[in-house]
Image: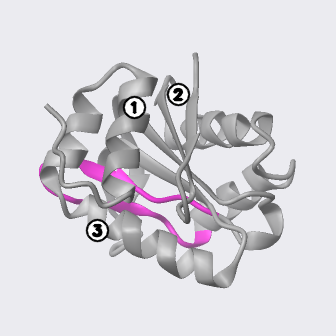
């Protein structure tokens, strides 16, 4: 699998990929591995994300496509980045608003944020993206990491250009 990355001014590095995992844990491990291989997170990041997901699940039943926003504390991060991934199949994640329920996630925004201010800014941007069905549908429909990165980067930069 290839992973595509870009760094825009005053924005987190935005990466795109297609996740091949078959369950929540395997998807999280796969994505954390990409961030680690890219030098953006420490070796401790993956376990921190898995532990956090158990206590504070991140599945969001957004319409028309459910998403997840896994992340860890900043002490596991070397460089702020958001890895936007389309899953090959719906992946059950526990819901952020009802941890006893699950939602079938198709798009994951794995966040690696290295500062408190960066965390607020990045989470705000991701939440704005989640509320834009055109962006989420475009990511979910793509099977090209470069296209996923491009869609997400345009959205993060505030571009009004919509994916086609």
For image coordinates 45% across by 25% down, the residue present is 145
Task: Tell me where the magenta segment starts and ends, as one range.
Answer: 55-71
Q: Which residue is mark 1?
A: 87
Q: Nearer the viewer, mark 1 or mark 3?
A: 3
Residue 36: image x %, image y %? 77, 41
Q: Residues within 10 Å of mark 1 (few under 14, many from 20)?
A: many
Q: Is residue 127 left or right of residue 113?
A: left
Q: Residues within 10 Å of mark 3 (few under 14, many from 20)?
A: few
Residue 5: image x %, image y %? 57, 36
| Disc 3 from disc 2: Cα separation | 26 Å
- Between residue 160 and residue 70, name the one nearer to us: 160
In the displayed structure, 16 sits above or below 134; it is above
Q: Main secondary structure of the magenta part?
A: loop
Residue 128's label in the rendered image is 3
Residue 146: image x %, image y %? 44, 25
Q: Which residue is mark 2?
A: 21
| Disc 1 from disc 2: Cα separation | 8 Å
Q: Earlier in the sequence, mark 1 or mark 2?
A: 2
Quarter placement of the N terminus: top right
In the displayed structure, 67 sits above or below 72; it is above
- Between residue 149 and residue 90, name the one nearer to us: 149
Q: Earlier in the sequence, mark 3 or mark 2?
A: 2
For image coordinates 18% across by 58% down, the residue present is 132
Residue 121's label in the rendered image is none
Q: Are marks 1 and 2 in contact (CB under 8 Å)?
A: yes
**Residue at the extreme right of the image, as rendered:** 43
Q: Secondary structure at mark 3?
A: helix
Quarter placement of the C terminus: top left
Count of numbered tags: 3
């Amino acid at each position: 699998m290839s992973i595509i990355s870009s760094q825009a001014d005053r924005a987190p590095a935005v990466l795109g990929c297609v996740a091949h995992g078959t369950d929540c844990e395997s998807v999280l491990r796969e994505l954390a591995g990409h961030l680690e291989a890219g030098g953006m997170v420490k070796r401790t990041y993956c376990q921190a994300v898995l532990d956090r997901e158990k206590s504070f699940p991140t599945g969001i039943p957004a319409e028309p496509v459910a998403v997840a926003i896994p992340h860890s504390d900043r002490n596991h991060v070397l460089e702020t980045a958001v890895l936007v991934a389309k899953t090959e199949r719906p992946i059950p994640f526990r819901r952020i608003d009802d941890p006893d329920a699950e939602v079938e996630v198709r798009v994951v925004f794995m966040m690696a944020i290295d500062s408190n201010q960066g965390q607020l800014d990045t989470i705000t941007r991701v939440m704005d993206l989640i509320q834009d069905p055109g962006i989420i549908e475009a990511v979910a429909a793509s099977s090209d990491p470069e296209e996923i990165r491009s869609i997400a980067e345009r959205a993060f930069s505030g571009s009004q250009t919509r994916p086609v």
